[in-house]
Amino acid sequence: MNSHSIELGVFTRASSTGKISPQELTESRLQLHYAVQYIAATGAALAEPLQDDSHTSFGWNSVLAAFVGSTIPAAQPFQMALEPVSLTLIVVDDQKDTIASLPLHGKTMREGLNWLQQEVSKLGADASKIVFLDYPPNEFPDHPLARGASFDSSQTSALRELVDYYIVTDRLLQTIVTSNEKASAIHIWPHHLDIAMLITLSSIKSGHPLTIGVGLSPGDTTYPEPYWYVSPYPYPDIANLPALDSQAFWHTQHWVGAVLRSPRLVENAKAETQQQQVATFLHSALEASIVLLKAEYGMRQSI
């Protein structure tokens, strides 16, 4: 793989990327994080269970311009979707046509769940099974929405900017997936709201799988703003970490991975320049991760 193999799209509104205050992005990220829990809850309750829990995840659908979850078997099969800029819940059929929709603005989590259960019941599924996922203590962000507050989708610029990060990252990860048979599908995970894929390798020395996670976090307790990461596992010795390109660095507290924080994108640059910086980072970090895993464990194949 080389950096030129990543076909660059465009930041759909790249001129505004990074110009919204971190505080505004954080609030919109939390609104989005809670809104996608309806997709996860429906998948967890009614989709075919998968060992990696990916039936609770969802992906970006460019045709619908929405996050779309797993297919739910029912008298009328359906999928749950979320249009993220307006925070609108959508039920779509197997042709991706809208069956029902609910703007979450002004609604509580409970009100949204009541609506969802009513609509799902109409489709012949057991809606009583749908409950919000229960995450470990201190591992899901707190917000007034958890205590009865209403959704607020008024910060459309911030929500739109967050969505741009997912669109761009999905395109970059799709290219990696299509060129690497060891790469997983791309998932957006409801727990951390990160979009990611996993490359699985084989160790000569131990025979156990070695993995490299590649993705984007929209921000969390580690870094409040969006950041891209490439994380080899088992974590390598931090004393031997190589230099990285594109203003990236190695994160070494609690987990080890190469990180490119969004504020380090070239300021006021064209969309293509910013995407090339991300592409170069992914290439550099993937290659570095392969070298680190190969040195410590040996590998039967490389990317």
Image (cartoon, rainbow, N blue to C red):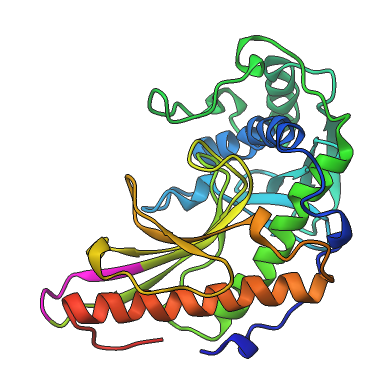
Q: Which corner quadrant of the image does residue 288 belong to?
A: bottom left
* Residue drawn where x is 51% and y is 49% of the image: 55
Vertical relation: 190 (above or below) 2 = above
Farthest residue to the left: give it. Answer: 205
Q: Is 22 placed left or right of 44 in the picture?
A: right
Between 42 and 166, the residue placed more toward the observer is: 166
Vertical relation: 11 (above or below) 132 = below
Q: Which corner quadrant of the image does residue 30 belong to?
A: top right
* Residue drawn where x is 55% and y is 89% of the image: 2
* Residue drawn where x is 79% and y is 63% of the image: 62
Give x and y (percent) for residue 52. Answer: 39, 53
Q: Would residue 40 be seen by someone viewing this image from the given angle?
A: yes
Give x and y (percent) for residue 223. Answer: 54, 43
Vertical relation: 137 (above or below) 234 = above
Q: Is 158 placed left or right of 185 in the picture?
A: right
Q: Would residue 234 be seen by someone viewing this image from the given angle?
A: no
Q: Which residues are magenta?
A: 205-211
Between 28 and 66, the residue placed more toward the observer is: 28
Vertical relation: 220 (above or below) 154 = below
Q: Which corner quadrant of the image does residue 202 belong to?
A: bottom left
Q: Quick check: is 207 in the magenta stretch?
A: yes
Q: Quick check: is 222 in the magenta stretch?
A: no
* Residue drawn where x is 66% and y is 18% of the image: 145
Give x and y (percent) for residue 185. Answer: 52, 67
Q: Is 35 placed left or right of 152 in the picture?
A: left
Which quarter shows the C terminus?
A: bottom left
Between 193 and 242, the residue placed more toward the observer is: 242
Give x and y (percent) for residue 211. Answer: 33, 68
